[in-house]
Image (spheres, rainbow, N blue to C red):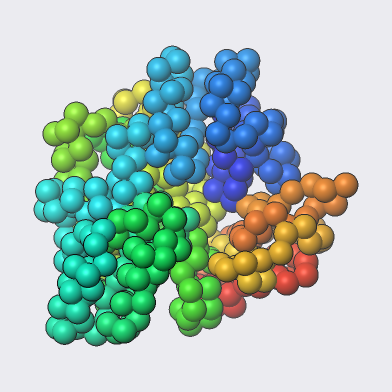
Amino acid sequence: MKILVIGGGGREHALCWKLAGEGHELFCAPGNPGIAEVAVCNQIKINDRKGLLDWAKEVQAELVVVGPEDPLISGMADMFRENGFLVFGPGQDAARLEGSKAFSKDMMKRAGVPTARHQVFSDPGAAKEFAAQLCASDEGVVIKASGAALGKGVVVCDDFEHAEIVIEEMLVGGIMGDAGRTIVVEERLRGKEFSLLTLVSRSQIRSLPVAQDYKRIGDGDTGLNTGGMGSYSPVNWVSDDLVAQVEEEVVKPILASLAELDIDFRGVLFSGLMLVGEHPYCLEYNVRFGDPEIQTIVSRLGDGFAEALLACAKGEAIPEISVQNNAACTVVVASGGYPGEYEKGNKISVKSVPDSVTHFHAGTANSGGDLVTAGGRVIAVCGVGSDLESAREHAYAGVDGVSFSGKQFRSDIAK
Ligand code: AMP
Ligand code: GLY
């Protein structure tokens, strides 16, 4: 099958790697130097809709997979569908689950999905009043920019003083731009986090193996939130029963509520969850594969991934995908300074690695024959093994083989 993947980060490299590995012919725009090893890349800009559509026609794509959230939120899946393509990725209506945290929380309420108590604000005074109320009954509060902000729009505040500053910065100072003109102020939950990625074909679902993500930049979960610094799977404290519970309480009800609004979902629903005591709460929904969760997940899947994505695109029953009896661990190697300001254009050298290690390129580029850094998260190194310990060892051996000036990574992934 000819498959066109839209995007050019670590997630898209993982998708292309897996789909090419199943014997399909891969095309990717804009792609990156890592993706170019497994797919034909064409550096069409992601906002050049006409260019992307023309290329899809030219290569006669039999399936289009839209990777990142921004194009989904702005309706790229609809555009391809309207032009007769089979598309894995929800339309603009459903992508609001990720594009607007205010919409998403409203839908959770409507669907009865367990989630943190919240209110939506654009007025700083009212927001502070509610934050003060929440802080009076608990330590801390969470402030979220409503719009999509590359995983950096959420601030977990330890006390009201901190919350006040963040509310002021977002609503008055505009530090998150338009994404932060409306905010969600919500109760701070405490528990263990995990992500469930569920393939959705209208009302039918099939969840992928659970992966745990590491959101903070620093070891021991310290420092700022990032897009994700590492992941591993399997997660031994998430049982099959818990997955089934999440499907019943978090996944199915939201899809039913979307269906009530005549919104059809064909893609992947990412539920960001927190286990509080024995109860799973939904922190957020995303409408695309998690990065760096998917690097870990595809490294554990057997055959049948492309067929499953195609079935979702067609709205048909999703065939089973086999899962290998192995473990995988992904460690993100990032630019110094990330998630704040960082340098670009630093020369990268990558030592060759055994089969148990894969380097998934995220923020890399070619410059004058050299591989150079071009983003905050540069390369996600995935190790596989018969158990987590060996997967972890392989991943960190792969990390050692990557060098560039300013390189940083967490040393406690899957520890
Ligand atoms: P989100 O983008 O909504 O998943 O938030 C990013 C991260 O912020 C999550 O992965 C959590 O670590 C943290 N977070 C979000 N909401 C809450 C909450 N209500 N209580 C505690 N931590 C939260
Ligand atoms: N790693 C979390 C995300 O993709 O949003």
- Residue at the image point whose x is 18% and y is 74% from the top: 129
| Residue 52 vs residue 129, the one in the foreground | 129
Residue 274 sits above or below residue 23 on the image: below
Q: Position of residue 18 (x, y in %)?
A: 57, 42
- Left/right placement of residue 113 relative to residue 404 reads left
Residue 340 placement: quadrant: bottom right
Asked where in the image residue 196 lies, by quadrant, the reply is bottom left
Of the pair 117 and 313, the residue shown nearer to us:
117
Q: Check the image and report above or below for 211 versus 161.
A: above
Residue depicted at x 50% and y 66%? 226
Which residue appears farthest toward the right when viewing the image?
Answer: 368
Q: Is residue 107 left or right of residue 78?
A: left
- Residue nearer the viewer, 304 or 215: 215
* Residue 281 showing in the rendered view: no
Name which residue lies at 18% across and 62% down.
119
How many circles with numbers are drawn on the protein?
Answer: 0
In the picture, measured across the screen, residue 171 lies left or right of residue 258, that is right
Q: Position of residue 112 (x, y in %)?
A: 11, 53
Above or below, 253 relative to 265: below
Residue 280 vs residue 7, the one in the foreground: 7
Image location of residue 321, percent across then percent down: 42, 41
Quarter where residue 254 is shown: top left
Q: Quadrant of the N terminus?
A: top right
Report whether residue 130 is seen: yes
Q: Position of residue 123 (x, y in %)?
A: 24, 62
Q: Residue at x 34, y 40 (%)?
A: 95
